[in-house]
Structures are given as C-alpha cells and as structure tokens.
Image: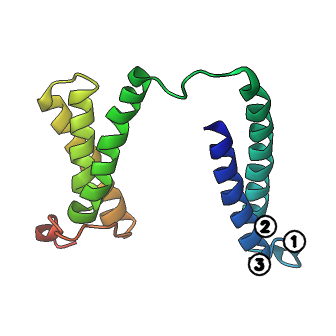
Amino acid sequence: MELAVAIVLFTVGAIVVYDSYRLGSKWGSDGPQSGYFPFYIGLLICISSIINFVQAWLARAGSSEAFVLWGPFKLVLTVLVPAVVYVLGVKYLGLYVASAIYIAIFMAWLGKYSWLKSVVVGLAVNASFFLMFEVWFKVPLFKGDLDPLRFLGY
C-alpha cells in the first residue's frame, strides 16, 4: 500500500510541477511568477514520494503482515464516514449549518460531551464564523442548495 500511495503522490506532484512550469515557474523582473511556489512544492512532493517509494520497496522484502487490522480501520471509519456525510451536507445545507451539526455530533459522539454543550458550541462557533465572514469581511461562503439561512437576508 505504501508503494501505491507513493506512486499516487508522485503523480500529483508531477502534475503540479508540469502545470506550474506551464504557468511560469521562474523569477521574473517583478518577482516570482505565478507558478514559482507551486513548482517547488510539487518538486518537494515528488522527491518525498521517491524517498517513500524506495523505503517501502526495501522494507517490503521481509514483510508479510496485513496492511491494516480491523480495530484501527474501524477508528479511521469513525472519522471518515461522518466526514463524507458532512461534505454531502455542505452541498445541501451550506457550510454554516453543516459545520454546526458536524461539530455538535462529533463533540457528543466522540468527545462524550453533553448534547446541550455540543449544540451550544456548534452554534456559537458557526455564528462567529458567520459574523466574521458574512458581516465583517463581506465574504459570502456557500449557503447550500437548500439555503436554510435565507431568512437572514444573506
């Protein structure tokens, strides 16, 4: 699995390097061109991926253990599945409402906080984000297809 991840990350890095070079990855007369910093980030990703690939290749010779056991995989799923549901929730409910629900459920479920405290924190955090972005910075964030905050006039 480490070999596959190294190959995927190298591919991502190579795409970044290629596209950054296409945009201009040199230092121009007025400073760095638009692809300058992404080019070097992509290059670091490629180099790191090669190092990981070589280390995984050398380590796999004597290894026959399973990639992941059920216990740790179950822990990963307890975070991954709600995160996928959250992303779907953002599409329909928007960032603010979906994030409030996500925070409240995670606090109550994984953090073992009371539902009252979880809901209050989820609402308070997202109300402060709403004020910061929508009111003070005047930067509208995605409200979702259903736009449950339409009644606020934003």
Where does the image place residue 138, in percent across and percent down from the top left?
A: 36, 70
Give the labeled residue for mark 1: 27
Q: Residue at x 28, y 26 (%)?
A: 110
Task: Tell me the quarter of the image containing the N terminus.
Answer: top right
Quadrant location, the C terminus? bottom left
In the image, which is nearer the foreground, mark 1 or mark 3? 3
Q: In the image, residue 73 lies at what x, y percent?
A: 41, 29
Q: Dot 3 corresponds to which residue?
A: 22
Residues tagged 1 and 2 counted as in contact (Cβ below 8 A): yes
Q: Amino acid at mark 1?
A: Trp
Q: Image quadrant of residue 147?
A: bottom left
Q: Earlier in the sequence, mark 1 or mark 2?
A: 1
Q: Is residue 14 above or below residue 20?
A: above
Q: Amino acid at mark 2?
A: Tyr
Badge 1 or badge 3: first in the primary sequence: 3
Along the line of sight, the residue nearer the viewer: 36 or 56: 56
Disc 2 packing (10 Å; few <14; some 14–19; many ≥20): some
Mark 2: secondary structure: helix
Percent x, y of residue 143: 26, 67
